[in-house]
Image (cartoon, rainbow, N blue to C red):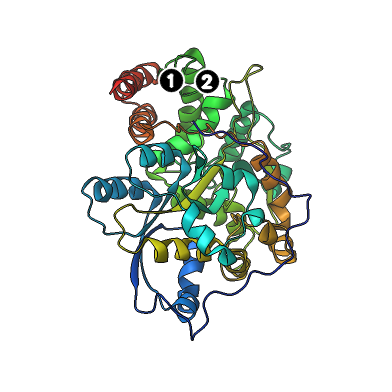
Amino acid sequence: MLNRRNLLMLGAAAATLSLPSLASAEDKPFNGVQISVLLEGHPTTDAIQKMLPEFKEKTGIDVAVEVVPEADITAKELLEFSSKSGRYDVVQNNIIYLPGFVKSGYIVPLDDFLAKYKENFDKADFVPGYFNTNVLDGKLYGLPVYGESTFVMYRKDLFEQYGLAAPKSFEDIENAAKTISEKTNKQIAGITMRGQQGIQGVYVWAAYLWGFGGSFFDASGKSALATPEGIAALDAFTKVLKDYGPVGVANFGWEENRLLFQQGKAAITLDATVNGAYNEDPAVSTVVGKVGYVPVPMKSTSPKGGSSSLAVHSMYVSTESKNQEAAALFAAWATAKEQQLKSIETDPNSGVTSLSALNSDSFGKRYGAFKEGMIAAINAGNPQYLPTVEQANEIINNTGIAVSKALAGTASAADALKEADEANNAALAR
């Protein structure tokens, strides 16, 4: 499993030396090379796409980008990897899949490539905790393009209107959701969260799982969802969404959940810290300046891990790529501080992995409303928040089915999680 060390060093000054530019117009050893890149739909992707002409001008490399939702990207990558299609030179994904990718030989170490082009790579500028999650057995396999944690977002104006204090517990969240839903005659949803089957619903429900004192595995490494803690966590999650959530919440992924909240149609949400950038963007949000940000609660007095996530999404170079060197150069460029600093100006990107970008005046100016809460969440982030074993994809899918069944009312939390445990243990035994 992946371990977290020295997560953030935000108090330290970021490196001030500017990185040398990529190859000049007169020196383009990759001129005419084409690479294909598979990325998630995310603000970082939007920003990178805007800057691609600069990359081609500097290197001569043509980059074809395909963008798919996070919920679909893993299955797509596994299909291409297992068939050895070589369709993509660079892929992006959550670091929870790194052990499986490495064991299966799907991706290559980047150390030698980055050593050759070290003028385009500054290890010291990456947030240490984000960078270190990409190191396995002493080798670097990925470069972090964005990182995030989770926190609770709530409408300060509505809480004040109805005499509610900032939520500090899961009980506070449910009580506030009930109050606002009833007081507004359900015109405003008391709470909204992701309920979509798969990693979307599991990502948010995991906050309840850990917060209630549960975990994905027991000490022997077997699936341990159908415990009293896990069952209570799923009961609480489904109850608050069914009673006080919006219509159609079972189909909500990250985007649907984010849009509902930033449009002022919900009083509370628990989701990724990157959502704060959308909440505070006057171009897309109706709740600018009206949102409070607090930590994910912890109900258990003896938790097995933190209730806020540590999510890192990185770029990897495929073993089947015929242009691995150019692919590694693209990954280094896309995650370099120059590009990350520009991304803050062009897109709602608060998930930067560069210390220079995170400590910049631009970041503080744009995201000061939630920066402190975001950093606190990242520092408390749980690196095992989602499974990081080789069978992570199967385990998340099985768990997602259980969450969906409980939310739909087609199975009790206990029965749904028992089924998930059985399926997960079968996957772990293979």
At horizontal 49% and vertical 44% (from top left) the residue drawn is: 139
Mark linked to residue 225: 1
Badge count: 2
Q: Callout 2, which amino acid?
A: Gly
Q: Callout 1, which amino acid?
A: Leu
At horizontal 36% and vertical 30% (from top left) the residue drawn is: 395
Q: Is residue 255 above or below residue 2?
A: below
- Asked if the residue at tag 1 contacts the one at tag 2, i.e. Cβ–Cβ closer than 8 Å, the answer is yes
Q: Would you identify the image quadrant in which residue 191 lies?
A: top right
Q: Would you identify the image quadrant in which residue 419 lies?
A: top left
Q: Nearer the viewer, residue 213 or 176?
A: 213
Quadrant for the C terminus in the image: top left
At horizontal 41% and vertical 45% (from top left) the residue drawn is: 252
Q: Secondary structure at mark 2?
A: loop
Q: CA distance from mark 2 to mark 1?
A: 7 Å
Q: Nearer the viewer, residue 264 or 123?
A: 123
Q: Nearer the viewer, residue 383 or 396?
A: 383
Where residue 322 sits in the image (x, y, percent)? Answer: 30, 62
Q: Which residue is mark 2?
A: 214
Q: Would you identify the image quadrant in which residue 196 lies?
A: top left
128 with respect to 101 (left or right) = right
Q: Is residue 233 above or below residue 128?
A: above
